[in-house]
Image (cartoon, rainbow, N blue to C red):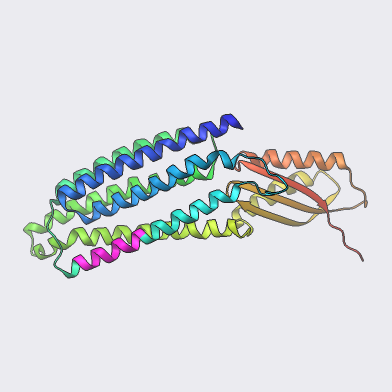
Amino acid sequence: MNKKMKTEKQMMKLPVYAGILFSVLEIMMALYANSQAVLMDSIYDFAEAIVLGLIIFLIPLFYKPVSERKPFGYAQVESLLILGKGLLLIAVTIGLILANVQMLLHGGNTIDQQLIGYFEFGLAMISAIVLWLLTRMHKQVQAPLVEAEILGWKLDVFSSIGVGLAFFLGSLLDNSPLYWLSPYIDQIIAIIIALIMLPQPFHLIQESLKNLVLFAPEEEVMEEIKQCAQELFDDYAYEITFYDVIQTGRKLWIEIYIRSHSNMLNVAQLEQLKLRIEKGLYDRYEGVDVQISPDLIIK
């Protein structure tokens, strides 16, 4: 477990360093070209890098064992940090939308759109390299943070390409009857980027709140658990009556209630079933704790 923790910490340093590099490059370009779209990207990347850097320092907590005082360990700390990240990104995004709307109402601004187009294509290439490295390293460690970063960098690749194309197309307006739109292209693209990005932090908040209040995981996760358990229980004289599943961060707590056709329970069999279910789910979920309990109904 200690080796896995160190591997995850090393992996997460890559998106942090890359995020800081991106934000520095974007701030420099935003100041040079006076682009609100690039400025929005820089603030977004910087906010993500700061939160992710904080999470890296707390990764050792996620690997601490459970105890009587902390029955769920520190699994919910991760959900709390992701909640904070989502709230921060929403605040930043809404603030940038309002700033760009205000600039639109005051006549916009003229920028070198081709320069920013080339810059965005360069960012897309760097993002693709970071995504490739993360995907390769993800095979070593299965963790929610890594999966979230892979999704984020996929979005970065496509958004940078889309923004680059938008600026190149916008540069064509200078010599067209729609030349009057040119000063507004930067703000329009910035607002579109913000609106596209806005659902992402809302999704982070929704998932982290579900984990914090100990709701059952998504239907896809429940079906995977049920399928894994049912396939194993089919070989024994037990009937599954109920699943009690909690997902906190990267950990799954599963309690399976059963009835015995013979009114007898074989403890050795149940222990074997528990271990086989945990092994079957471990490839996808890092921490899985399975308990099998008799469904006691007094008739």
Which range of residues does the magenta coloring cover? 92-103
Kindly indicate the quadrant of the structure image that contains residue 269: top right
Report the label total. Answer: 0
**Residue found at x 25% / y 64%:** 99
Farthest bottom residue in view: 105
Outermost residue toward the top in this view? 3
Decide whether the magenta segment is chiefly helix, strand or loop: helix
- Residue 208 in view, yes or no: yes
- Residue 17, how many percent across, how many down? 36, 37
Quarter the N terminus occupies: top right
105 relative to 236 in the view: left or right: left
Query: Magenta segment: does it hold 98?
Result: yes
Q: Residue 108: image x %, image y %?
A: 15, 63
Q: Position of residue 285 (x, y in %)?
A: 61, 43
In this rendering, the answer to whether 103 lies above or below 66 is below
194 relative to 105, above or below: above
Q: Nearer the viewer, residue 52 or 186?
A: 52
59 left or right of 93? right
- Is 136 left, or right, of 173 in this rendering? right
The quarter in which the C terminus is drawn is bottom right
Residue 150 visible in the picture: no
| Residue sitting at x 63%, y 58% | 214
Q: Is residue 116 magenta?
A: no
Who is closer to the viewer here, 211 or 296? Answer: 211
- In terms of depth relative to the viewer, which is nearer, 243 or 233? 243
Residue at horizontal 86 percent and vertical 48 percent from the top: 237
Residue 248 in the image, given as x and y percentages of width and height: 61, 51
